[in-house]
Amino acid sequence: MSNGNLPEQIVFRIRRFAPGRDKEPVWKEYPIAYEVGMTVLDGLWKVKETIDPTLAWRASCRMGVCGSCGMLINGKAGLGCNTQIAELGTAVVTVAPLANFPIVRDLVPDLRPLFDAHTALSPYIIRADTAEQEEPTREYYQSAEQMEAYLQFSYCIKCACCMAACPTCATDPVYSGPVALAQAHRYNTDTRDDGFEVRKEVLADEVGPWRCHFAGECSRVCPKGVDPAKAIQLMKRQLVADALGLRKKPPLAQPVEKPEGIERRPGIPEAPPPTV
Amino acid sequence: MRDQKLWTWHLAAGAIILFLLGLHMAIMHLDALLGIFNPAGGHPIDWANVVARGQSMAFTMNYILLLGAALFHGLYGLRNILFELDPAPPLKKALSWVLILVGVGLFIFGTWAAWVGHQVASIT
């Protein structure tokens, strides 16, 4: 089956590299038959199954959820599973591993720098009432407006496309990068969280948002529509206000009591008991 | 903590530059509106007006403040650019000290020049 804009045969031009075996990366070309609806990830599978079984990449969900198949596609960072070859509009599809990371093999980047930076910024809810968190008895109240303040940043799937596009990450290994900083902002903005001071210990130092030049490439390439560049600017504003003693600490969300005297509508099942 | 404070000062210096440089531009180019800064009348760069502004302690302080803000803002920005070239930690430290010494040296020299200018204008 052919597509009106693409020939029946397309060529995958893939950057191959096996550290320890190869001295430097090489480009190899693999002609495959194009099928309507084919994604870049489908094309890679086809190359592996029909031409070269040694080709390596990382993928899992194939539906833009897990964030495993981040790669440079025609020079732009994106998810292989999310990118239709027809959308690219080129008969030659160039695929390379994500930039700004060491390479494990072929299209597999070593994402440890990302996860180290992410872990260092405590990307989870921090608050004093640990007993309530461990064994929740009630729910923390949060208004729709309060949730809206951080919601888009919680869509991040840590695919590292933003890190590969970031010009600061390309030159400065100390910089935490858009993933970790956007997630730190996501938790700093969450009214259930009280961990600003803990994260500030890291953010206020050299690894923090200070080297971001607001190039905006992170936001441009994000396959989930997250705007990490905005998160970083908001974080700078928050930290500057804090340094000047002007930061307004929002009231911490408190557990709400279960309403009393309300009849449950018939036919609505109870929420299942906590499993964790 | 250090970078958070340095960045805050960087922004504050930028705001000071914006205000003082704006004031300078207004005095130089909106003299029809801001005639009080040109008591000798005529053009703002007439020597008599330059001397009159030099006699003013407020102007002298403004020059010194603008010099300090511009030096800090510019040299901190330069430090950021140099640090993005990923120098080794000892070189980072050395660069910071060089920039601090250059900044302090230029500030002392500029302050001395502004103060001497004020003294000379006062006896003119």
Image (cartoon, rainbow, N blue to C red):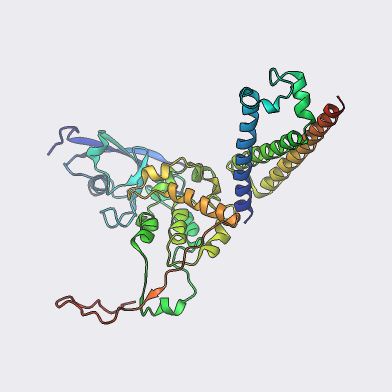
Quadrant of image for the C terminus of chain A? bottom left
- Residue at (26% x, 82% y) in the render: A261
Q: Quadrant of residue B13?
A: top right
Check the image and name the residue furthest to the right.
B123
Please tell me in which quadrant of the rendered image residue B29 appears: top right
Asked if one can make out residue A197 in the rendered structure from this viewpoint, the answer is: yes
Depth check: give the residue in front, A200 or B116.
Answer: B116
Residue nearest the observer in this picture, A268 or B74: A268
Q: Residue at x 37, y 78 (%)?
A: A136
Can you say whether A1 is above or below A274 in the image? above
Q: Is residue A115 visible?
A: no
- x and y, in percent, of residue B116 in the image: 84, 31
Q: Residue at x 34, y 54 (%)?
A: A67
Name the residue at the left extreme. Answer: A1
Vertical relation: B25 (above or below) A33: above
Given residues A125 and B38, the one toward you in this image is B38
From the top left corner, tell me how far across and down residue A120 is, in percent.
Answer: 51, 61
Would you place residue A74 above or below residue A194 in this image? above
- In the rendered image, residue A19, in percent from the top left (x then y), is placed at 45, 49
Q: Residue at x 61, y 51 (%)?
A: B3
Assign the N terminus of chain A to one quadrant of the image.
top left
Compared with residue A37, is residue A207 higher up or lower down, i.e. above or below?
Answer: below
